[in-house]
Amino acid sequence: MLTSKIMNYYVISINTKTSIGEALDIMEKNNINGLPVVDDYKNLKGIIVKTDIYRFLMYEGHNKAYPVELAMTKNVLSVNKDEDIYSVGKKLREKNIIAMPVVDDNKVVGIISIEDILDYLLKNTVK
């Protein structure tokens, strides 16, 4: 089964220039822990999670007005929309993460999580 068949096409992303405070507000309003960070052309540039933000804000002089590009993780693990879900599940487990952006030509087109894969497998397993 391909990632494109079960991934979530609704993904909230933010720009590299978005403030840390705004990123936190978006996460809180949408009950999510992280956001893909894209440039003006929607190319994936990083990911920011609450832990990144809290770590960044611990340093004296850092505040919520800074852009997320200063606190985000730049080397993001992502998957292609045509990748097999078993391969994706293996990557998620090996890296101990719960979700990854799905990209097509380096543009974010969705997100896939361990939960998406598990739901698919549970619905399609013969009892």
Image: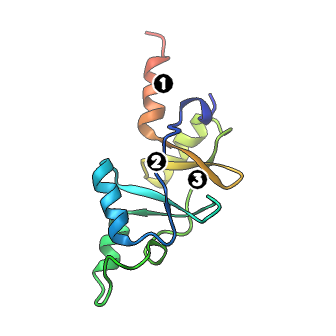
**Amino acid at circle 1:** Leu
Distance in Å between CA atoms under marks 3 and 2: 9 Å
SS assignment at label 3: loop
39 to 63, vertically: above or below: above
Residue 5, position as x, y percentages in the image: 59, 29
Distance in Å between CA atoms under marks 1 and 2: 16 Å
Q: Quadrant of residue 61?
A: bottom left
SS assignment at label 2: strand
Q: Quadrant of residue 23?
A: bottom left
Q: How crowded is mark 3: few (under 14 residues within 10 Å), some or many (20 or more)?
A: many
Which of the labelled discs sits on residue 121, or is there none? 1
Task: Say whether disc 1 or disc 2 marks the residue closer to the N-terminus.
Answer: 2
Which of the labelled discs sits on residue 57, or is there none? none
Residue 86, position as x, y percentages in the image: 58, 35
**Amino acid at circle 2:** Ala
Residue on which the image places disc 3: 78
Residue placed at 31% from the left, 81% from the top?
Answer: 63
Residue on which the image places disc 2: 99
Task: Say whether disc 3 or disc 2 marks the residue closer to the N-terminus.
Answer: 3
State how the image is colored: rainbow
- Residues at badges 3 and 1 in contact (C-beta under 8 Å)? no
- Residues at badges 1 and 2 in contact (C-beta under 8 Å)? no
Q: Answer with left or right where residue 6 lies relative to residue 55.
A: right
Residue 107, position as x, y percentages in the image: 64, 53
Task: Please state, as top left, top right, bottom left or bottom right, where the N terminus lies in the image.
Answer: top right
Mark nearer the viewer, 1 or 2? 2
Residue placed at 35% from the left, 66% from the top?
Answer: 22
Residue placed at 50% from the left, 37% from the top?
Answer: 8
